[in-house]
Amino acid sequence: MEREYKKKDTFLRNWGAVIILAIFFFASWAGQFANQIIVQQNDSKEHGQVFMMEEFWPQFWASTFENWQSEWLQLTTQALLISGFAAVLFRKQDEEHYKTQLMIEQLRKDMKKK
């Protein structure tokens, strides 16, 4: 008798990885914000100027989008390479899986004959 063990689907089981990635994303973005604001404040002090948030925001958004652009470029390149390799690698695995399935079916037929 065959029993299947199936874990109960929960919100965390379904969305846990997304939640963790979102936490890492916002934590790193907050880190970028904090570091950039410190650098901007130090720059203002060195030049004898008063730090102003109005001048900070354009620089923050520019560096954010520049960072995201480079990250998306890397991610797209990786995705394309992985897709290309996966097409070759998984084709071989599919062939092996198909052969294994045929062997299992043949064994089942042989078992029924006995």
Image: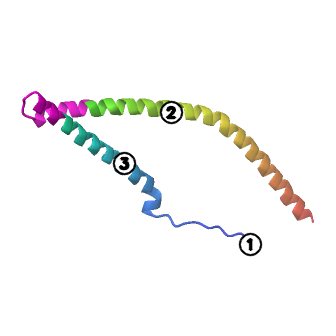
Residue in the image at 10% along x and 27% along y = 47
Q: Which mark is residue 86?
A: none
Determine whether 110 is above or below 68 in the image.
below
Q: Which mark is residue 1?
A: 1
In the picture, measured across the screen, residue 2 lies left or right of residue 77, that is right
Q: Mark 2 points at which residue?
A: 78
Q: Residue 24 carries which label?
A: 3
Asked whether the residues under the numbered discs 3 and 2 touch, taking CB atoms below 8 Å apart as contact, a structural biologist would say no
State the separation of the CA atoms marked 1 and 3: 45 Å
Q: Which of marks 1 and 2 is nearer the N terminus?
A: 1
In the picture, measured across the screen, residue 54 lies left or right of residue 106, that is left
Say what secondary structure mark 2 lies in.
helix
Name the residue nearer the viewer: 74 or 35: 35
**Residue extent of the magenta highlight:** 40-62
Q: Which of marks 1 and 3 is nearer the N terminus?
A: 1
Determine whether 33 is above or below 110 in the image.
above
